Image (cartoon, rainbow, N blue to C red):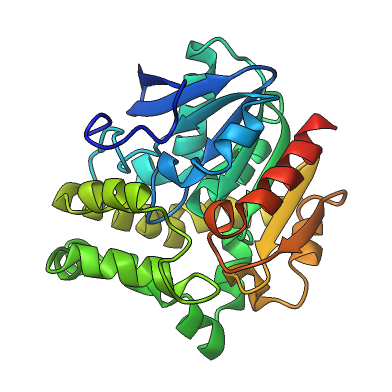
Amino acid sequence: MANEFPDLFPGFKSETVETEEAQLFCRVGGSGPPLVLLHGYPQSHTCWHKVAPLLAERFTLVLPDLPGYGSSSIPALSQDHHAYSKRTMANSIVELMRLLGFDKFHLAGHDRGGRVAYRLALDHPHAVSRVAVLDILPTFDYWEKLDRQFGLKVYHWMFLAQPAPFPEKLIAASPVRFLEHTLASWTGNKSLDCFSEEALDDNRAWFRDPDRISATCEDYRAGATIDFEHDSLDHQAGNQILIPLLALWGEKGIATSVESPLDVWRSWCPHAEGQPVPGGHFLPEEAWQETADALRKFFAD
């Protein structure tokens, strides 16, 4: 699948790396300190194609597809959702980077990738220098906040987390329509205008695969169970992120469901910094220049 569409990352290498839990497809390019960029739902690494050229001037970028997404392998579903927990995914990213020759790296994640990113910062503080999270709040805080208004805004959290195969069967009946509705509805102007046609074509192709639809649902089932449990234990123990953390959120994004996203992040990382950027949820495409500038400044520091 990686070669079926126009190359959105000219000059980058394509790699498929075998980790203990999954085969991870990734793109590698640029020069300088290593920086991992993790995508979210319902996208793949291609969501970074507008930001990558600007960051590649200063950093060696590694852009993986998360397990089950894009061109990475699809771990088996299980009753405890272990393979799709953010802890397991974070372990795989640490292993990926070690196999690529990097024992320590910078890390940024959007949406589900942001959840992998902050989990990695909690579990592997020795492996990551700085971490950025884009348009999310911690999983624990989302579930604790859930009320009528927030539930309507993030209805997909409950829908996708339903037991298999209920949500995946419904989505598979019209996958492209579901994909395009989801993408458009989370943007600031409720349209697909910010997404390039090449990235959309790549997204449509892999999202038609019933097994991948099921994998992305399993991601949310993990979020409602094992991920929440891991966050709860850290919250109860007072565990915090000790490395520098940057939180970015869209002015019309999902993280604005609370009065101050930065205050929430400072309960997990006292020295967190952050700011809003224009647009909705999809910062790397709706506000690619502002996002690239903020990430470049933060990681260059």
Image point (52%, 90%), residue name: 148
For this orientation, the residue located farthest to the bottom is: 148
* Residue 200 visible within the image: yes
Give the x, y percent position of residue 64. Answer: 44, 32
Can you say whether 106 is above or below 158 in the image? above
Closer to us: 284 or 167 = 284
Can you say whether 150 is above or below 91 in the image? below
For this orientation, the residue located farthest to the top is: 101
Give the x, y percent position of residue 189. Answer: 52, 76
Image point (87%, 48%), residue name: 271
Tally the marks. 0
**Image side of residue 264 versus residue 180, left or right:** right
Closer to us: 167 or 273 = 273
**Image side of residue 20 versus residue 268, left or right:** left
Which quadrant is the C terminus positioned in? top right
Image point (55%, 73%), residue name: 188
Residue 85 is drawn in which quadrant? top left
* Residue 239 visible within the image: no
Which quadrant is the N terminus positioned in? top left
Give the x, y percent position of residue 11. Answer: 47, 20
